[in-house]
Image (cartoon, rainbow, N blue to C red):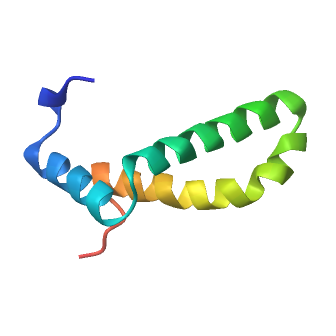
Amino acid sequence: MATENISNDVETRLRDFFKDFIEPKDMARMLRQVNYALSVSSMRGCKTLESELPYIEDDFYWLNKLAEVLDPYLDVE
């Protein structure tokens, strides 16, 4: 990804997100967990999804928080 495609506003929000809410390493771990759980459950017919559900619920929250940092369309002004 080319960083020149990121506006200053988005860059600031990303910096604040990782400073105020979650460490980048933790976010990367969550992205990998949810990617693993969804991929494997899809291949196995959702048997794995049940055991990964606690992680997916938390990961889902953080993925949505990151999405809001990148493009805040759910914010009510």
Q: Picture coordinates of residue 36 (x, y %)?
A: 68, 35
**Looking at the image, how many numbered discs can be counted on the residues?**
0
Q: Residue at x 17, y 37 (%)?
A: 6
Q: Is residue 49 above or below residue 42?
A: below
Q: Is residue 28 above or below residue 59?
A: above
Q: Residue at x 35, y 57 (%)?
A: 68
Q: Picture coordinates of residue 54 (x, y %)?
A: 72, 60
Q: Is residue 41 left or right of residue 24?
A: right
Q: Residue at x 20, y 23 (%)?
A: 2
Q: Nearer the viewer, residue 41 or 17?
A: 17
Q: Is residue 52 left or right of residue 18?
A: right
Q: Residue at x 63, y 42 (%)?
A: 33
Q: Nearer the viewer, residue 41 or 19?
A: 19
Q: Nearer the viewer, residue 63 or 76?
A: 63
Say which quadrant the C terminus sits in. Answer: bottom left
Q: Picture coordinates of residue 64 (x, y %)?
A: 46, 56
Q: Is residue 71 visible?
A: no
Say which quadrant the N terminus sits in. Answer: top left
Q: Nearer the viewer, residue 16 or 4?
A: 16
